[in-house]
Structures are given as C-alpha cells and as structure tokens.
Image (cartoon, rainbow, N blue to C red):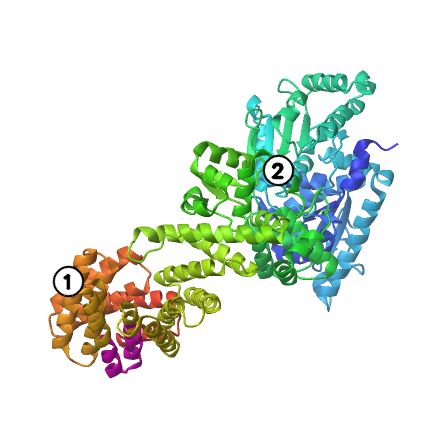
Amino acid sequence: MATSADNAAAVAFPVEVFYSYSHKDGKLRDEVEKSLTMLKREGIITGWHDRKIGGGEEWAGAIDEHINSAQIILLLISADFLASDYCYDVEVKRGMERHEAGEALVIPVILRPVDWSSAPFGKLQGFPKDAKPITKWSNRDEAFKDVALGIRKVAEKLRAEGAAAGPRLVAAAAKAGALPRIWNVPHSRNVNFTGREDLLKKLHDSLRSGNHAALTQTLQGLGGVGKTQAAAEYCYRHAADYDLVWWIRSEDLGGLASDYAGLATELSLPEKDEKDQRITVKAVREVLARRGRWILIFDNARGPDDIKDYLPPGNSGHVLVTSRNVAFRGIAHTLPVSAMNAGEAVEFLLKRTPDTDEEGAGALAGALGGLPLALEHAGAYIEKSGSSFSGYLEIFRTRQHDILGRAEPPVGYDATVATTWEISFREVEKESEAAGQLMNLCAFLAPDDIGREMLRGGASFLPQRLAAAVADDLQWDDAVVALRKYSLVEVEDEVISVHRLVQAVVRDRLDEEGRKKWAETAVGVVNAAFPYRKDDVKTWARSSRMLPHALAAAELAEGLQVGAEAWGRLLNDVGLYLRLRAEFSAARSVHERALKIGDAVCGREHPTVAVRANNLGSVLQDLGDLAGARAQFERAVKIGEAAYGPDHPQVAIYINNLGLVLRDEGDLAGARTRFDRALKIQETSYGPDHPSVAIDVNNLGLVLQAQGDLAGARPCFERALRIGEATYGPNYSQVAIYANNLGTVLRVQGDLAGARAHFERALNIDEGAYGPDHPEVAADLNNLVCRLTELEDPAGARAHFERAVRIYERTLGEDHPNTQRARRWLDSLG
C-alpha cells in the first residue's frame, strides 16, 4: 500500500531535469532547454540553471544538490564534454550511479560529432533518435523537436507510473528532499513559481537561526499576493530539512482544529480517536514539543488568538503562518509579502503562457499591479483562449467587471480576484463605518500617496463619519487599524497606499448610485485640496503630489458622467500646473477636456469658457501651433467683450495673449496695436504700478524691440522690472522674464557687462523656481550664450547650447521651433 509520502510524490511530479554539459557548448545547451519550454509550461518537467549560481563551493554544492534530486539527467555530448574532467569524472559518474540504482534516468543528447560508444553511457539510447548530432541535421529545428519529443515520452511515463511502478525513483526523490515521511501539503508544486528569492531566503535564514523568537514566522500581506504559494514553495524546497510537514487550514476554527487533530493519526497517537478534540490537540502539542525536524503551516490564519493554543511549547520545530492580519508580532516574526516587482511579474507571465511578447507582458503586469492571483488569472485565460498579453489587456481595460466576475479560482488559490477580499470588506464595514467609507474614497483616487492632509483639505465633501475621523487622531487610527488588519491598505506617516486591483474591486462592488456618489466626493476633495497657485512657489511641490489623484478622480468622474462642473474646474487647474512643469502635450490634452466640458455645462459663450480657451491657447503657443493658439485667443476676446464689455481687465489679458501670438507670427503692427490697447485698459483699471501693467508694458517692449526701436523698448523693460521687484521680490520667476528681456536690449546696445548680469540673474532665478530642465532655463541659457560668444568663450557657449538643446528636446520635442532654432545656433559654433 502506498504511503502518504508516495501519494504526495505522484502528485508532486513535475519531473526535474538536470543538464550536464561543457560550458563551451553553452549556446547549444540553451537551445536544448528552449526546445523543452512547452514541457515546462505544461508542468511536465522543471529545470534549474547553474548560471544563476556564483562560482566556488556554492556552485559545486548546488550542482551536487540538483544532480542528486533530478529524475532525468541529460548528458549533452560533444568532444568538449568528453574532455571535461568535471563533466566526465563528477557528473557522469554520479548520474550513472543513480541510473543503475533506478533512481534516475540518464539520457545522452548528441550535440556535436564525437565517438562516445566506449563511454560508460555508450549503450544508452541517445537523442536525436538516429544518433546523428544536432549540428549535422539539415534542419536543426527538427532535431531539437525530436529531442523534445523523446524527453516528453520519458517524462510522461515517469509521471504516469509515479509511486506505483517507480518505487526507487520515489525513494530517490524522498532522499533528495522532496518527500518527508509525514506530509499533507495540499498544493502540488507550482511549476510556474517565480521570484520571491529574497523572501524565501529570509524565511529560511530566520527559521534556521536557532533563535527561539524566530522559530515562528508569519508571511503577512494582502489576499491574492501569494502568501500561500510562497509557503508551499518553501515546503518543497526545504522538505529535506523535515520529517514532518503538516498543513493546517486556519481560516475557520473548525477546520483548524480538525486539521491539527488529524496529525494524531499520522503520529499513531492513542488519543487519535478521542471524541473530545481538545484532548487530541493537547497530545499532538506534547509530542511535537519532544521531537524535532517538523514544521507546521497555519494557512490563512485570521489572528494570533486563533492559533496560540495550537503552538507547541519549546523550540524543537518550526511554525509558519500565512495571514492578512498584521497583528502577529506578539507571537511571531513577520515577513511582509508584497506584489511581484515588474521583472518577476514579466518572468511569470512568459513562463506561464505561450506568448513571448516581453513588452506586452510588461504592460499587462503593470495593469495588474504585479498581484500573483491576477497574473495567474491572466495566464490561465490566455492559455485557454489562445489570446495574447495585449489581447487580454484590452479586454481587461474595457470589460474588467466581466473578466474578473466570470473567472474561476486558479489552481492553488481558493478564490478569484473578484471574491478574495469580499469577506475582508464586510468585516471592515462591521468594525468601522469610517474605515468602510475611507476604503470607498481611496478607490476613486490614485493608488499611492493618499495623504490625510489632502483629505483634511477637502473634508467638507466627506460623509460625516469619515470627516470626523480625518479631523480626530483617535478616530483616524481606528479607521486605519481596521483596514490594516486585513492588509487592504499600507499606511506610513498618515499616508495610505492601496493596490489598484483592490480599488477596482471596491468600485465594482458598489452599485451605480454608490459609484457616482464616491466619484463626486473624490473630485470634490481633490478640487478643494489642489493647492496650485502660480504666484506661490510653496504650492508647486504639493501640487506635484496631488497631480495623480486629480487625474484619477477626474477620469473616473468623467467616465461616470457626474460632477462635470467640478472635474472640469479641476482639469483646468491641472492643465495650468502641467504647463508650469513644461509637460505641454499632457497640458494640452487636459485643457482640451476642460474646454469641452465647459462648452457642454456652461454654454459656448460663458466667461468660464473664455478662461479655458485662453489657457488652451497658451499651451498651443508653447507647442508651436500658432494658428490654433490665435483661434483660441480670438475666441476668448470675443466672449470676454460680450460678457464684460471692451474695457474690462479680463479682456485685456486675452488681448495681450493674442498680441503675443501675432508677434510670433510676424505681424508686429497687429501685435503692437493689441499691446497698446491692453496696457491702456490695465493702467485705467489698476493704476501705473500694478503687476498686470508690468506684463503689458513688457510685451509692448518686445514688439518695439522687434521693430528696431531699442530706445523705446528699454524703458518698457526697466519699468516692468521695477514693478515686478516691488510686487514679488527680487527672485520671482516673472522678474526673471523682465531681467532677461532687459538684458537682450542692453546686449544690442553694446552694454555687454550689463547684459550678462541680467542674463545670469534670470538663469539663477529660473533654475531655483523651475529646476534645471525647464524650457525657461533653456531660453536663459540661449541668451547667456550670445554674451559668452562675444567674449570669445566658444567652449562655454557650446556647453550652454548643448544643455539648452537637451532641455528643448525633452520638453518640446525635436520638431519644435525652439528646439530647431537652438540646434541651428549650436551648429553655427562649428
């Protein structure tokens, strides 16, 4: 009769394959392994790569471990292989010993022509079948297919015979560490298991440290993040360390007690038939306390109180817990389990499916947030449907509810993405109404960096319980604790992060009315808290943090067609901030959306539409679309004149911007007419020293300079600079514009020292305000270069021009007029 270990062996195959080869044949070895890719994906074989191990004793030890555990040993035959002392004296010798003992099968694969008939393996059946070396086949792809077919037949035979017909192979597997005597791990080894190397190493090091405090370890993390899979993989990898590996389903108290008591039967304890399960549990604890080489796995434990009475006293064995709950620190050392990183997720998808598109795998892995459960969902769907990474991603984005709702639990998981967190959500809502509301709100924001400060700024839009929690430290902590208990969020310094798929499932479990309500709430919160003010540098960094939330909230509200006025206003502010950051293409898209919603909600002739048309025009001008910019400014002027009359200061702003486009188009007379009109309106409205007057007088100076009237332009720039310094102080970005323009006039007038001083001042101000890679900085560099060239400093001039070109290429693109102009100036230096 087969033992529990034998039965586990029959389930536990895939068959492990070991490659013995000369490293001079490394490329052919890779082709052999590649030909077996489908066998790996089907779970028929598994393999190991010696090149992932460093040299020396570690490498030799890994070789010994795997040649002793493999069921199939491939000898990759060539003259170099036969000449290798290590291959011939170590790997061939050990492989043949195991072959003759019935513990493994040795299969020669003939890579290159060589006489191998007198070798110890000379009488074995080799592949390709006709004994012709792979390198001599006219079609080498066919040769590799022949090798793969032969190995498939051998591996499938071993899997089919299993424990019943291959006892020596089973015994060898047990000897190699796959099968301890008592074993009930309910999961077959996952042939697609990927990554987690650091986690598994930390777990092993802690359990083997001998430190009593480290003998109980908890893998803690979000549902679906792969805690159970990591625990199962640890059991398979380190089974040789134990005589007893016992898996205990711990999500409910009944199953926990039953599984734990079941160990009494395997241990042949007299108490195994006791009706009072407490007696049986006590007996198991006492026996385990007296023996070593065991590990208990409490899978999906709800909390420390559920398992503490099942932990054997002393330090004779190991305990591994998997849980969503963070509260195990009192009885166990906790190892957080996070989603896979990008590299691990891509590697998993490529291993799990027939698709070989790495770029597509990367895009899909990013959309799924590296969550193992979701990746397995995707892999199973692609494999069954014959789809591709890009095909699945398109369906996921457009029909997420359908694809997650119809999925079945993947192999090795008890739930789907759509159901794995439902119990947690319900428990959170029972424990704390504010926590449930916070979870709903977070689902309509960006997944990371959700700050309590932002929620405070928009507290007037929050429901009563959540608003109270945001305002009160104790209530806030209660809400956060309820969410952290089930690993639904991560919290650090009052900043929340939530997995994007958790967000998706939270949104999906709400009805349509609920989704609209929370989308409007999120937009309201972000709108109220979005801090951007162009004239306040302190708001810029906070705006950067808020930007992802603004875009996410606006997109969700737009998709649900709610809160149009609010998210239209939010998008306008976002567009202004993006323009400040020189992200002009993104700013254009946002401003176009804001203008469209303004037309729809306010009406095409509303003053709000004029503001948004003006802002879109400014971005189009930045991008070099002068005709498009002029059309938007003309529309803004028309709406403004109808709404406010021809002499209103707001109209002057639109007229001024229209003049700037006309100047860029070369219509200097038309530009001067607009600047004169705008300046007159602003002086009449605000007096001679208002910052709006400075803008208009500065622009008038620009057109005078372009017309060759330097004597008229210089006092305009001096007046603008004087007003700017008095209004904003000496180091504000608007002051840099006026200083720069004054420098250009001084340079032409021959005052080179004065010009250089103003250019350097402008550069210093803009670098401090915008950072080193902004187009305004590039413009300052260009102006300064002219001065350096005249002082015959070509090296300095070239360095500045090269930097300016790099900035323009990154922010404006290679085809923008400013980029091309800077490149021509650079080329002119020779």
Q: List x then y, in percent, for residue 229.
A: 66, 40
In the figure, residue 473 lies in which quadrant? top left
Residue closer to the observer: 346 or 662:
662
The verdict on residue 267 being magenta is no
Three-letter code, disc 2 = Gly
Residue closer to the observer: 382 or 586:
586
| 408 over 770 or under it: above or below | above
Left or right side of 539 for 732: left
Q: List x then y, in percent, for residue 446.
A: 50, 51
In the figure, residue 685 lies in which quadrant? bottom left
Secondary element at tag 2: helix
Residue closer to the observer: 777 or 303:
303
Three-letter code, disc 1 = Arg
- Neighbor class of circle 2 (other Cα within 10 Å; few <14, some 14-19, many 20+) is few
| 275 over 248 or under it: above or below | above
* Extent of the magenta region: 656-675
